Image (spheres, rainbow, N blue to C red):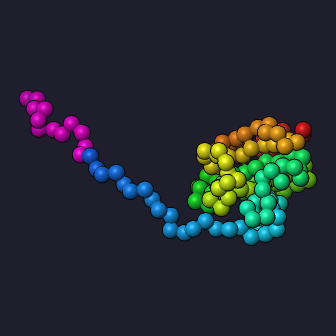
Amino acid sequence: MAASASSRPLAAPLRAAAAPRAWASPPRRLLGGAAGTAAGSTVAVLNEETSSVDKELKAHARVIVYYTASWCGPCKGIAPTVNALSDSHAGAVRILKVDIDDCPEAAGAVSSVPTFRAYSGGKLVGELLGANAAKLTALVGDLASK
């Protein structure tokens, strides 16, 4: 015998939507000089009080702007690759780390993190969305060769 349609629920009961998550800690300010360096690496860290992305683009011929966030898991996962690439291409490519929570005005139209934007002569020449180490290595290598 077949079970009647009324004896089985057709869909799971609806639950109320969760409230938006409020972050417990305020944005952190980064310490350092004009664009300090991350501890143990040559990655420059943007400090909104003393520097800007535009200043860095004017001061350096080839720049990768690395948009990140402290709460971002993929950003934490790609960080060792970013540090290694910065060390291996020191002098050829400047990698500038921008925390979107610490410097929201510098983040501009960044829709996801991590985002890497490559600039040569102040002009955008490439972009990578996501934490793909192989593509990031290729992006930095291509920019270094320009």
Magenta stretch contains residue 9: yes
Q: What are the residue bounds of the magenta stretch?
A: 1-13
Helix, strand or loop for the magenta stretch, by majority: loop
Q: From the viewer's perspective, is residue 21 above or below residue 146?
A: below
- Residue in the foreground of this view, choosing between 40 and 97: 97
Residue at 70% over, 53% down: 106
Residue 115: x percent and y percent? Answer: 68, 46
Q: Is residue 10 left or right of residue 63?
A: left
- Residue in the foreground of this view, choosing between 55 and 130: 55
Q: Quadrant of residue 75?
A: bottom right
Q: Is residue 13 left or right of residue 112?
A: left
Q: Residue furthest top?
A: 1
Q: Is residue 69 left or right of residue 19?
A: right
Q: Is residue 76 visible to the viewer in this orientation of the structure?
A: no
The C terminus lies in quadrant: top right
Residue 135: x percent and y percent? Answer: 73, 40
Residue at 57% over, 68% down: 26
